[in-house]
Image (cartoon, rainbow, N blue to C red):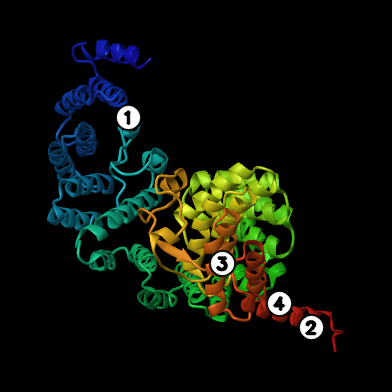
């Protein structure tokens, strides 16, 4: 269709002294521009410019702006700068000034960028540029979406022109402020505010709000609070935004009462402020007023249907109210709004796990591990779930992965060692019980881990699959462990002498351990390792304990 239109326009434009020749050239340029054929568009615009009379400043201005847009799209930024400057000298306007500022910023010319910003600020409000031929000119801006610029194309009066001027000024300020001083970003915001203050006070206030928000993101709450308290003295929407942010800061500082007061102040100004409703709900939540918190979150969702904070917090509140199905619905809604959000995925999986819905819990934890594959806690929980549902191999795999990423979780280490014991793989279990001894040497089950001769130590083969896959400290060192679990494993693989020695070492540290004495006595009877006096002493102690246990309680 565009090719046919261009062909028709070209036929008409080539007729000598056609009364609409300039309009036809401009339309052809617009079509070439839409086809991304910028060189042809520039050629048509220049022909149209040559056909423009000197007193037609409005038309000449718009043609030059279109030429600048086409140069910018082609990557010829310096040529675009010349076209925009010609347009501004002809009839300055906010949109062309904004495009010129973007070009200088892209070239890294900060002095010219600052001069452009001052020039935009000083541009007078007037509607003389909007004549009856406005609909045939492009109204392209170098930053912003097409939907954002629809208002510019429809400008036919001073009020709408003023709104679009504010749009360009605000976006220009946002571009210039952080670029002026790379060593002190706040100085750029201060300069922009000072330029805007006289002619555009409302925009200066908005930039100050954004500056305080940036301090918040940098976690400088003191500076942010100081700026917001100054803005709190303003009226209307500015005060509402300042109170909302102050409520947030107070909440982070732990001052729940002040956070609630600021939230109420914001809602007094605007009862449909979703962020303030969320802040008030958070205060109720901290005070364990879950029903009131739920009402606030629901009200915030009524104001803003996709308010992620309200939906997520509603899920947490439903969990505290023992409403798991409603909580899951809230978190699933968050999952639809922000796919693969780890916090939402975890909450869904956790609720199913607590509710004994193992199949759904496994499903959601599996999705979560695909999103965060190195979270040891999630891997461990998934391993336990698989083990409880007769998938021992997968259960061991995920617990091994958990151990690989976080090798100091005693619960995971013990469960892996115990699993090897139940499968009668005692040699492999010793490695994990030794790891447990490193973490908790005061527990008799693991005992102390100390260096000893290699010949007296039972360790995994350094070339074994287990060692190669899950050990990260190099080859296994010659350590001996004096824990009950290690001694039992050594006894079961036939290393009775080593097991007996471990029991003796344990009794030196834990002389009151009945279990250790019983096991030492058992191995002594079976393999005649100990002397008679030692066995007699163990038997007397055990008989006294048995008599004590049989005695009636007082």
Give how far apart the Cα atoms at labels 1 and 3 are. 98 Å
* Closer-to-camera residue (489/408): 489
Disc sitting over residue 539 in the figure:
4
Contact between marks 2 and 4 (CB within 8 A): the answer is: no
Give how far apart the Cα atoms at labels 3 and 2 are. 27 Å
Identified at 22% across, 37% down, the residue is 65
How packed mark 3 is, by other alpha carbons closer than 10 Å (few <14, some 14-19, many 20 or more), is: many
Horizontal arrangement in the rendering, residue 192 relative to residue 418 (left or right)? left
Horizontal arrangement in the rendering, residue 125 relative to residue 480 (left or right)? left
The picture places residue 12, in percent across and down from the top left corner, at: 26, 12
Q: Which one is earlier in the sequence, the residue at label 2 or at label 4? A: 4
Q: Mark 1 points at which residue?
A: 136
Q: Name the residue under label 2.
A: 548
Give how far apart the Cα atoms at labels 2 and 4 are. 14 Å
Contact between marks 3 and 4 (CB within 8 A): the answer is: no
How packed mark 4 is, by other alpha carbons closer than 10 Å (few <14, some 14-19, many 20 or more), is: some
* Closer-to-camera residue (515/266): 515
Q: Which one is earlier in the sequence, the residue at label 4 or at label 1? A: 1
Contact between marks 1 and 3 (CB within 8 A): the answer is: no
> For the residues carrying marks 1 and 3, which lies nearer the camera in this image?
3
Q: Which one is earlier in the sequence, the residue at label 2 or at label 1? A: 1
205, above or below 141, in the image: below
Quarter placement of the C terminus: bottom right
Horizontal arrangement in the rendering, residue 511 relative to residue 41 (left or right)? right
Q: Which one is earlier in the sequence, the residue at label 3 or at label 4? A: 3
Identified at 26% across, 59% down, the residue is 178
Q: Name the residue under label 3.
A: 500
Give how far apart the Cα atoms at labels 2 and 1 are. 104 Å
How packed mark 2 is, by other alpha carbons closer than 10 Å (few <14, some 14-19, many 20 or more), is: few
142, above or below 457, in the image: above
The picture places residue 146, in percent across and down from the top left corner, at: 39, 38
Q: Which one is earlier in the sequence, the residue at label 3 or at label 2? A: 3
């Amino acid at each position: 269709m565009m090719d046919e239109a261009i062909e028709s326009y070209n036929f008409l434009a080539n007729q000598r002294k056609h009364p609409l020749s300039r309009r036809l050239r401009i339309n052809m340029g617009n079509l070439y521009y839409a086809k991304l054929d910028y060189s042809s568009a520039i050629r048509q615009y220049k022909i149209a410019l040559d056909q423009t009379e000197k007193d037609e400043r409005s038309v000449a201005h718009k043609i030059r702006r279109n030429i600048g847009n086409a140069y910018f799209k082609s990557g010829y930024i310096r040529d675009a700068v010349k076209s925009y400057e010609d347009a501004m000298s002809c009839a300055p306007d906010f949109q062309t000034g904004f495009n010129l500022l973007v070009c200088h910023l892209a070239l890294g010319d900060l002095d010219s960028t600052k001069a452009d910003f001052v020039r935009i600020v000083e541009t007078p409000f007037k509607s003389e540029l909007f004549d009856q031929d406005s609909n045939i000119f492009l109204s392209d801006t170098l930053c912003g979406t097409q939907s954002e610029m629809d208002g510019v194309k429809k400008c036919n009066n001073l009020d709408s022109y003023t709104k679009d001027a504010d749009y360009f000024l605000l976006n220009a300020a946002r571009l210039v402020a952080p670029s002026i001083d790379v060593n002190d970003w706040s100085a750029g915001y201060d300069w922009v505010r000072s330029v805007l203050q006289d002619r555009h006070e409302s925009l200066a206030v908005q930039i100050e709000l954004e500056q305080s928000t940036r301090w918040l993101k940098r976690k400088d709450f003191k500076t942010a609070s100081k700026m917001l308290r100054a803005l709190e003295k303003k009226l209307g929407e500015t005060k509402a935004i300042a109170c909302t942010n102050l409520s947030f800061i107070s909440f982070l500082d732990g001052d729940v009462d002040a956070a609630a007061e600021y939230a109420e102040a914001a809602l007094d100004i605007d009862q449909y402020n979703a962020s303030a409703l969320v802040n008030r709900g958070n205060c109720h939540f901290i005070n364990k007023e879950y029903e009131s918190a739920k009402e606030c979150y629901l009200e915030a969702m009524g104001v803003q249907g996709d308010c992620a904070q309200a939906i997520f917090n509603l899920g947490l509140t439903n969990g505290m109210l023992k409403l798991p199905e409603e909580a899951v619905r809230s978190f699933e809604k968050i999952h639809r709004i922000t796919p693969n959000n780890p916090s939402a995925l975890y909450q869904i999986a956790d609720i199913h796990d607590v509710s004994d819905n193992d199949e759904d819990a496994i499903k959601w934890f599996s999705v979560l591990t695909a999103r965060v594959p190195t979270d040891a806690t999630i891997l461990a929980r998934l391993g336990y779930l698989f083990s409880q549902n007769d998938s021992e191999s997968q259960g061991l795999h995920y617990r091994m992965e958990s151990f690989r990423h976080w090798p100091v979780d005693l619960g995971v280490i013990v469960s892996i060692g115990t699993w090897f014991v139940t499968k009668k793989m005692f040699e492999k279990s010793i490695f994990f019980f030794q790891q447990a001894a490193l973490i908790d040497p005061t527990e008799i089950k693991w005992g102390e881990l100390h260096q000893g001769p290699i010949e007296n130590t039972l360790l995994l083969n350094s070339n074994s699959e287990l060692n190669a896959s899950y050990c990260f400290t190099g080859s296994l060192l010659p350590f001996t462990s004096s824990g009950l679990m290690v001694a039992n494993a050594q006894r079961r693989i036939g290393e009775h002498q080593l097991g007996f020695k471990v029991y003796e070492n344990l009794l030196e540290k834990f002389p009151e351990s009945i279990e250790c004495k019983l096991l030492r006595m058992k191995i002594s009877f079976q393999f005649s390792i100990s002397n008679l006096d030692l066995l007699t002493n163990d038997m007397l102690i055990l008989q006294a304990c048995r008599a004590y246990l049989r005695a009636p309680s007082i």
